[in-house]
Image (cartoon, rainbow, N blue to C red):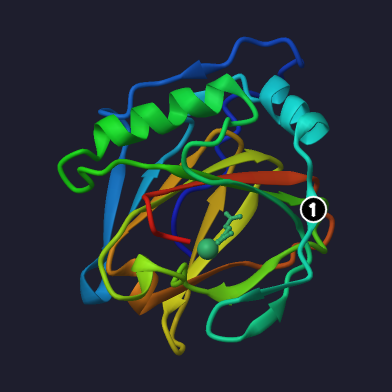
Amino acid sequence: MSTGIQDSLFDTPATADDAPTVHPLATGITRRALAADAWVDLRPGWLTGTVGLFDRLRRSVPWRAEQVRMYDATLPVPRLTAAYPADTRLPDPLLGELRAALTDHYRSALPEGFASAGLCLYRDGRDSVAWHGDRIGRGAYRDTLVAIVSLGAPRVLALRPRGGGRSLRFTLGSGDLLVMGGSCQRTWDHAVPKAPGAGPRMSVQFRPPGVL
Ligand SMILES: O=C(O)CCC(=O)C(=O)O
Ligand SMILES: [Fe+2]
């Protein structure tokens, strides 16, 4: 089954100096309930004017090649990453604004707020991340929230019940927000499949304290 949003490249055509705008989160969010008390919120076009941000981050972030990463297994991960643990300086003030807006909006579900930021760069359609849950730390045993802001070329973020089953595919365009909540990290897996011909795409994941 194919479902979810289509590319929402609200900010095309755009130039590198277009003004970034963070739109209100109170409007435009759609929640989709999943099995096992998991859910996904989608807010297409949360951020517009993303071209400059994408370019700045691509240039200024100290991207590192991931050799291996532990989920349930050790996996090779073809993409570049950068980690910004809680209380470290984010690579762009706009990311601080996004994190504050997310913390504010999800306060009743997540009183502790969002803390860390993880950045991933998928250089082209050959980069990807395999099926996994964000189950290092608290996500392994408690409900939690993981918020993903997509920048750059549209890519599919797929979700399927842990251990297999029919997958849901959400095409995320530049500036779109997807939030996984409830039991999602324990009971569902997610992946960014390879996409031949795709352009560069970045994701910024905000996580609460103790979730990796
Ligand atoms: O790039 C994405 O949208 C997903 C990244 C992800 O799932 C992760 O780094 O744990
Ligand atoms: Fe993940």
- Tell me if residue 124 comes above or below residue 126 in the rendering: above
- Which residue is rendered at x = 46% and y = 88% of the image? 164
Task: Determine whether, in the image, residue 183 is placed left or right of residue 202.
Answer: left
- Tell me if residue 201 comes above or below residue 67 in the rendering: above
Between residue 163 and residue 120, name the one nearer to us. 120
From where the camera sits, is residue 1 visible? no
Instruction: Please tell me in which quarter of the rendered image ligand 1 is found.
Output: bottom right
The residue carrying pointer 1 sits among few (fewer than 14), some (14 to 19) or many (20 or more) residues within 10 Å by Cα, namely: few
Please state which amino acid type lies under the numbered disc 1.
Arg
- Tell me if residue 208 comes above or below residue 25 in the rendering: below
- Kindly indicate the quadrant of the structure image that contains residue 80: bottom right
Residue 59 % position (x, y): 82, 31
Between residue 155 and residue 107, name the one nearer to us. 107
- Which residue is rendered at x = 79% and y = 70% of the image? 67
**Across the whole image, how many numbered discs are drawn on residues?**
1
Between residue 140 and residue 88, name the one nearer to us. 88
From the Cβ of disc 1, is ligand 1 less than 8 Å away? Answer: no
Residue 162 % position (x, y): 42, 83
Residue behind mark 1: 64
- Kindly indicate the quadrant of the structure image that contains residue 24: top left
Element type where label 1 sits in the image: strand
Task: Determine whether, in the image, residue 50 is placed left or right of residue 140.
Answer: right
Residue 38 % position (x, y): 27, 67
Task: Determine whether, in the image, residue 16 is placed left or right of residue 95.
Answer: right
Residue 185 % position (x, y): 38, 69
Task: Determine whether, in the image, residue 164 is placed left or right of residue 59.
Answer: left
Q: State the residue lying farthest toward the front.
A: 87
- Which residue is rendered at x = 32% and y = 29% of the image? 25
From where the camera sits, is residue 187 visible? yes
- Which residue is rendered at x = 65% and y = 30% of the image? 91
Q: State the residue lying farthest toward the left.
A: 108
